[in-house]
Amino acid sequence: MTKKKVANTNICRRNDFYDSTPENLIEEIMSKQLANEEKWLEIGLPDLVEQISENYETYGGINHLDGKDLPSKKIVIELLEDILSILFPGYLGNEKLTKSNINGYLTKVLTSVYVRLVKEVDKSLKYFCRKIKKCPEDVCLKMAQVIVRELLEDICRIRILLSGDIKAAYCGDPAAKSFDEVILSYPCVLAISTYRIAHELFVRRVPLIPRMMSEYAHSITGVDIHPGAKIGKNFFIDHGTGVIIGETAVIGDDVKIYQGVTLGALSFPKDEKGHTIKGRKRHPTVGNGVIIYSNASILGEKAVIGDNAVIGGNVWITSKIPSETIVTVKFPELKLTKK
Amino acid sequence: MTKKKVANTNICRRNDFYDSTPENLIEEIMSKQLANEEKWLEIGLPDLVEQISENYETYGGINHLDGKDLPSKKIVIELLEDILSILFPGYLGNEKLTKSNINGYLTKVLTSVYVRLVKEVDKSLKYFCRKIKKCPEDVCLKMAQVIVRELLEDICRIRILLSGDIKAAYCGDPAAKSFDEVILSYPCVLAISTYRIAHELFVRRVPLIPRMMSEYAHSITGVDIHPGAKIGKNFFIDHGTGVIIGETAVIGDDVKIYQGVTLGALSFPKDEKGHTIKGRKRHPTVGNGVIIYSNASILGEKAVIGDNAVIGGNVWITSKIPSETIVTVKFPELKLTKK
Amino acid sequence: MTKKKVANTNICRRNDFYDSTPENLIEEIMSKQLANEEKWLEIGLPDLVEQISENYETYGGINHLDGKDLPSKKIVIELLEDILSILFPGYLGNEKLTKSNINGYLTKVLTSVYVRLVKEVDKSLKYFCRKIKKCPEDVCLKMAQVIVRELLEDICRIRILLSGDIKAAYCGDPAAKSFDEVILSYPCVLAISTYRIAHELFVRRVPLIPRMMSEYAHSITGVDIHPGAKIGKNFFIDHGTGVIIGETAVIGDDVKIYQGVTLGALSFPKDEKGHTIKGRKRHPTVGNGVIIYSNASILGEKAVIGDNAVIGGNVWITSKIPSETIVTVKFPELKLTKK
């Protein structure tokens, strides 16, 4: 009947690799059936449990038993979202906020964040002390209290930075209709806010938590900003997917970058034992007022981009660029051929 | 013992920047401890609350207090998912659907979507009226009712479009085993369905909500389609990560594009005050039957791609391409050197 | 007052396309109002329900009514996460695990995974049998039992592989501070673990579920690994966003890949009916010890990369590369012009 025809018009049919193998499949599967396949839970499972828990013993690297607690991914993300709702009141939180209830709201949320975040930071510091076997537990707690207090005391400064970032997005993108649209629907807002929070924990040498936060933002936005990077004010990332900003990258004020831009490392010098050396500067430095267009790769610590330079799309840079310079790539000519 | 050895074999050891600093850390942290650090919640918090709420006053741009409601991100995403479950019955919804219960199901879901979406659209229109101080509230509600009704009345048309898109994916990708696999596991399905819904709200000038929907799809799929773009039928995006389709892009029928393709803007003319001009055409136009391979960048309104053109990977285009043309880039030759 | 000024300094103002159209909008909307717009739910909805369910009849391709169950996306993702928590005990699960409670925990989780996964695999096999009309239901269940048992019995082997992958990440990235940081915050961990699980189901010819799992990992990490690919040990993907590894790609041991790398297909030969042929080898083969830098595209089954080759960033390869070779691209020279 016609109706069905509509649905099937022009469907490209072909032999699917599934179509050709039912008998083989059935034969194959029957040959693999155990005597009491359906009783495997009683008969087979106990051995498997033994094997796996022995395997846990042997491969210590990827299991975490009997150790001190690690920070919980779930709680770290909840804490991040609570801090974001303080940074953008009335946008991301669920409560209806008015000038009259705002102080009560802040007291409640800040108290809750303080208590929970101290606990997670304490865990991650203990984790680190455990490794260096030097840090009495109460010191970890004291450190956690100082670190979290300092982070919360930084909220006003961070909001001032973010207000510059939002403005930069609104002004930098012709498609932006309002500040509210930017805050409610631009991925750079989550990516940059998360970076600015995680960075404060990173510079205070909190293990694990800053990267857990930045990877959360990465998973949502496709923007991978290492918490160790240093980024100035009025920063805008448009679209964002594929942007990477490495651990030792330094970015000035009023910088605008597009999707797919990498501020990465060029090579990893090895120590005498042939092991990659960690902790040294290995990412670019970007001056004030620089614009970097889509998919440009700027690599290595020697790549120092001068103020107000404009880096064209797909450009590959590994060395110094003077300020006030426009860098483009002579594109390989296009070959047009008739079909 | 051997077991442990297994785990540690060939691990590259090196001095981690954490390893070298425990004393400094402890010293540093102790120097920062307040007199009554552990009592900070009572002593310090109240001041901080004052500072932050004062900061809210000063930086009006990034907080939203006492204003009319904004549409809720959470509810907008729930509504999007409900509409998707109507578009793909039996795939995405949780209920078991049969021809006998389908009408009851549709009545229930459509009613619920209508009531909730009218509320969110009303909010977002009020938000916009608030700015232009001209639109009596009941007009916003009436507008919301018309807009939501028209969207729901469009569902059949949208399904016909989507059925073409699914077919294009199945036919266009040799790895696709069945229509069901495409619908259950291809990111382009969420990206394109969301676009087709958000576009209907965008053309009816609903603020905020269309971009909230498209950014949700972007966060899940890595495909960033602005709701303002115009896209024809049988559209397929393979893999999708990094694809960007700008607000004023126009795409014909039977177009296939791959990961990392940008249909973007080239430059943003400024008005006499030096501010970026908004609303004008600034993205490419792509004809019917065009294929655009991975990471091609097609930029600016002058980039008009003729029917059935094939655009090769990594190509950079800013001008007109005649129809029936294959465009490739003479790749810079490879340098092979022995290690 | 000064405070407000702070917020508004230097905001680029311009005519927003919303600003200019309130009257037109109101006029337009009023012209579209139905006689009893506010009663549409009673008057209009019933017809719409009829149209949509008729549309369901006509466009069979994108609805799934009265068919056998399909595997549930929600449950498949829950199962994947349960299996991951067995692979990384104490990291991803919520329970506090100790050597004393580990066996009880494993018995509980493995039993639950077995029961639920057998059900979903059974569904997806039935779905497939339904198409080939040949496979008695109990065979599907028996197949499901064998497949799930074999997968669970593979957990130790998979953990050994993953322990190599984690080590490769820790050693390969100077920013990695510890194994724990890698496991808790590196996207490659989810991408590769999910691949190693999904691959076991794929080779056992389970329809739908493997791709549902790999697309879940893709949506979180931006890394798109087809479950059909063959990948050796000690595999590391850094950053990951935009990485694509196709269905018939083969990757050796000790391979390291950066963001945006595509191991893709070059062209899709058609059968005599002009339909894309499925199932044949069409993706690259990568030898042992190969490093592939960011955004390199390696395309087609003829692209065979020899052992220990180093492929530079942005390189485009479609043919054989000898082992021990460094491949770079002579970058098109940069054009520097003063502003």
Image (cartoon, coloured by chain):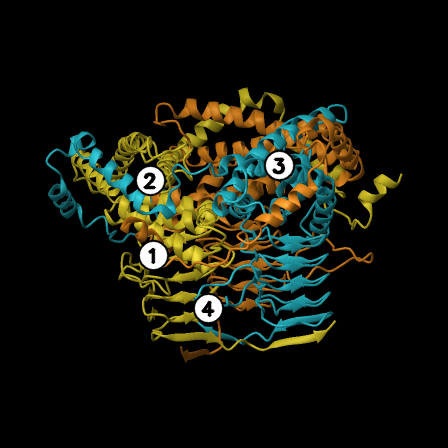
Chain colours: A orange, B yellow, C cyan
Q: Are marks 4 and 2 on the same chain?
A: yes
Q: Are marks 1 and 4 on the same chain?
A: no
Near-viewer residue (A256 or B30): A256
Nearer-N-terminus badge (3/4): 3
The residues tagged by marks 1 and 3 sit, at their Cα atoms, a distance apart of 37 Å
The residues tagged by marks 3 and 4 sit, at their Cα atoms, a distance apart of 38 Å
Q: In this rendering, would A284 be left or right of B277? A: right
Q: In this rendering, would A325 be left or right of B334? A: left
- The circle drawn on residue A9 is 1
Q: Amino acid at mark 3?
A: Lys
Q: Amino acid at mark 1?
A: Thr
The residues tagged by marks 2 and 1 sit, at their Cα atoms, a distance apart of 62 Å
In this view, C42 is above or below A264: above
Q: Amino acid at mark 4?
A: Glu
Of tags 2 and 1, which is closer to the observer? 1
Asked if marks 2 and 3 touch (Cβ < 8 Å), the reply is no
Q: Amino acid at mark 2?
A: Lys
In this view, C307 is above or below A8: below
Is the residue marked by circle 4 packed among few (<14), some (14-19), or many (20+) residues within 10 Å?
few
Task: Quickly name the residue at label 2.
Answer: C4
- The circle drawn on residue B268 is none
Horizontal and vertical percent position of residue A319: 60, 68
Asked if marks 4 and 2 touch (Cβ < 8 Å), the reply is no
Task: Quickly name the residue at label 3.
Answer: C142
The residues tagged by marks 4 and 2 sit, at their Cα atoms, a distance apart of 71 Å
In this view, B289 is above or below B31: below
Q: Specify the quadrant that holds the N terminus of chain B.
A: top right
Task: Quickly name the residue at label 4.
Answer: C272
